[in-house]
Image (spheres, rainbow, N blue to C red):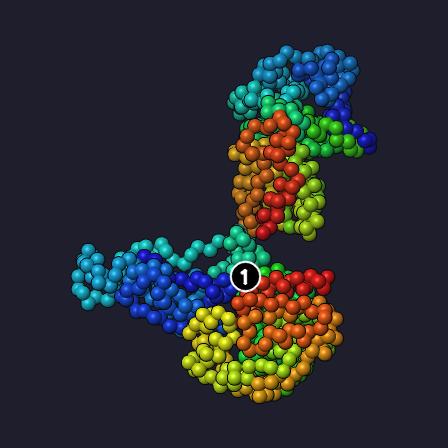
Amino acid sequence: MAMMRYAEALNQALREEMQRDPSVFLFGEDIGRYGGVFKVTKGLMDEFGESRVRDTPISEQALAAMAVTASMTGTRPVLEIMYADFMPLVLDALINQASIYEYLWQNVTMPFVLRTQGGGGAGAGAQHSKSLDSLVAHIPGIKVVAPVTPADAKGLLKSAIRDSQPVVFLEHKLLYNLRDEVSDDPELLVPIGKAKTVREGTDVSIFATSRMVLESQKAAELLAQDGISAEVIDLRTLRPLDLDAITASIAKTHHAVVVNEGWRFCGYAAELSATIMDFAFDDLDAPVARVTLPDMPVPYAEPLELSVLPNAARIADAARATLK
Amino acid sequence: MTDITVVGAGGEYMESVVVVSWHKKPGDSVTAGELVVTVETAKAATEIEAPTSGILTEIRAQIGEEVAIGTVLGTIRDGTAESAPAAKANTPVATAPTAPAAPSALPVASPVAASGPARITASPLARRIAARRGIDLSAIAPSSPSGRIKLRDVDAFTHAHPAPAAAPVRAAAPTSTASGVNLTRRGSGTGTPFVFLHGFGADGFSWQPLVATLGADHAAVLVDLPGHGRSPADAGAGSFEDLAAVVAQALAEAGIEECHLVGHSLGGGVAIALAETGRVNVRSLTLIAPAGLGPEIDGDFLDGFCRATQAESLKPWLMRLFSDTSIVSLGYVQATLKARGDDLRQAQAVLAGRLFPNGTQAGEMRAALRRVAVPQKIIWGEGDRIIPMRHALGAGPEAAIHLLPNVGHMPHVEAPATVARLILQNARCAG
């Protein structure tokens, strides 16, 4: 075990997988010489050379198509898209190629990983702060993961690289400096499709994704002061969803709060809410509460940005409301 | 077509009502706000007014029938009695003017089917559990501000109505103790229970409005004092202490070792005596217009109340209990009469003769109250005509005195929200 930052855990996962499998290669904007905007790929070009760590022009649409075709022809590419806000540029490759070719041609596999980072709270403005989870989670055939801890970041990235299907790997800019213990066992993987209960509770279940897991844990602390026992579930994988973990928790608490940093309307939280009603309706003692970004751009000014981002207080309020 | 359903007083905390009388018959014109039917709850009663003007077309709940809250008692259709035949002429069935309005109206009035009892709002979980336990959701009052019945409401109901063949835990909760004293449990709370001792001539049901306000998450035990309610008619007791001993025995048999104690009037005197014995660990003591703190009491009330066997003779005395006498409707009087059989009436007369001879309180509890070292509150209505409010000054220096304006001898009925708040405050003082 070693203490390391989330960004370093990702770097270690990439290094280990590149050492293990020569077909793994990285490409993206500024990931080589510069080491990535968030330094996730720092030092990898020196270690693995320019053919396996490639700096590319600014053309997300072309990069995504390259990931599809490279993976179809026997390699395991890991593409970095600098900001999730640019995901609309890669959607054609995901929606009309990556998610469809296996259906059209059976023998095709596309084992690529598309890493990107989103989220607000860094004063990055309306074009660099979005959480567009639902855009990619919407697509059948694409797996979507969003780790919160450094250990999960490493374990899930390794699983994603070894997976035979396309995986979108969602990071969060405010998580890169998070430090925690990470295993140095190169074969310790975190399975895709498994949620994690990060706090056990009996009164209300809070299902959260990405950085909102941390806010939900703080909310659980607030609720504990009121004598409310909140269970916090880190979904870790947005698609395929860990239904068993969700229904088991609701069977225990009968109250659900879903938290996602994306927009509310047609958002990922809406999908969670509907899924809970599909599979746990008869266990619900109150309507599912949704905590999301309002349907508006993320403001640049810090007080405004903080006023719209979901946070612990709002999550706690939502939990209290369901329990009334 | 407009439904007549039970709304207002009683509907909030009762599960069912009994139809006492219809003041209109089918075919009669009614005006919005006009009295159409009187229903009785356990002790209170409600006069149901016409929700709209029109013609009473149908009586669905007959006199003496017990119906769930929300049930449609009858229906009112637009129009007036004079214009009714003209309206009927539109349908070939009703050309004969002598055709009885109600039966012929029913089959053609398709909206009736669509306007049955109000839809019950309940969480999916509450619905599932209630169905499993065979509980009719219409009997359950929601405690959530959303108005939605939740699991806790179903649990509270289950707790209050233990089925004979229910789970062992429930079956073990006694409603009647070996000593014969009837205890009614309310609420699902697991904390220290609130034990309620009613006033002279009342019974455990008289706390319903207050307990409903208190909330289902507090455990409440409603005691029927000897000679009252469903407890044995033969009181045999001649003092507050005698009654307290019987109650202590009943609480011990029910496994209640500590409680927050609330007593009204006669029950107030008993509560002081019970707290002083130490046979049950009383954490806080809330006394509502208690007896035992001074010599005066309205002897005319006691005499008249004990003698009355008809609504006409009982009503004036009941009105003396309240500041707002409109509470004492005919239905309320009839319900009171019905709840008190002749054997109870005679037992109560004997008890009154022992405890309050010649309009005087024989029991003196001021010294005892000062020896009870727990948080104490005295609540009194400024309009009390049964026991003078100034008796509150007989309490010791540690008692908090709360005087309620525009309230008579029944603060727990006239101002249940305030009284509930004060009781909870007092309980919190006990830590």
Q: Quadrant of the N terminus of chain A?
A: top right
Instruction: Name the chain letter of the residue that bears numbered label 1.
Output: B
At numbered mark 1, what does the secondary structure look like: helix, strand or loop? helix
The residue drawn where x is 34% and y is 59% is B52
Is residue B51 or residue B88 the one in the foreground? B51
Name the residue located 56 percent from the left edge and 22 percent from the top edge: A88
Q: Position of residue A222 (x, y in %)?
A: 69, 45
Can residue B12 be seen here? The reply is: yes
The residue at the point 73 percent across, 15 percent down is: A34
- Quarter-wise, where is residue A131 in the image? top right
> In this orientation, which residue lies closer to the viewer: A107 or B86?
B86
Q: Nearer the viewer, residue A319 or A98?
A: A319
Q: Position of residue A217 (x, y in %)?
A: 69, 41
Residue that badge 1 annotates: B133
Q: Is residue B166 visible?
A: no
Left or right of A306? Residue B108 is left
Which quadrant holds residue B7?
A: bottom left
Looking at the image, residue B361 lies above or below residue B381: below
Amino acid type, callout 1: Arg
In the image, residue A225 above or below residue B117 = above
Q: Position of residue B28 (x, y in %)?
A: 28, 66
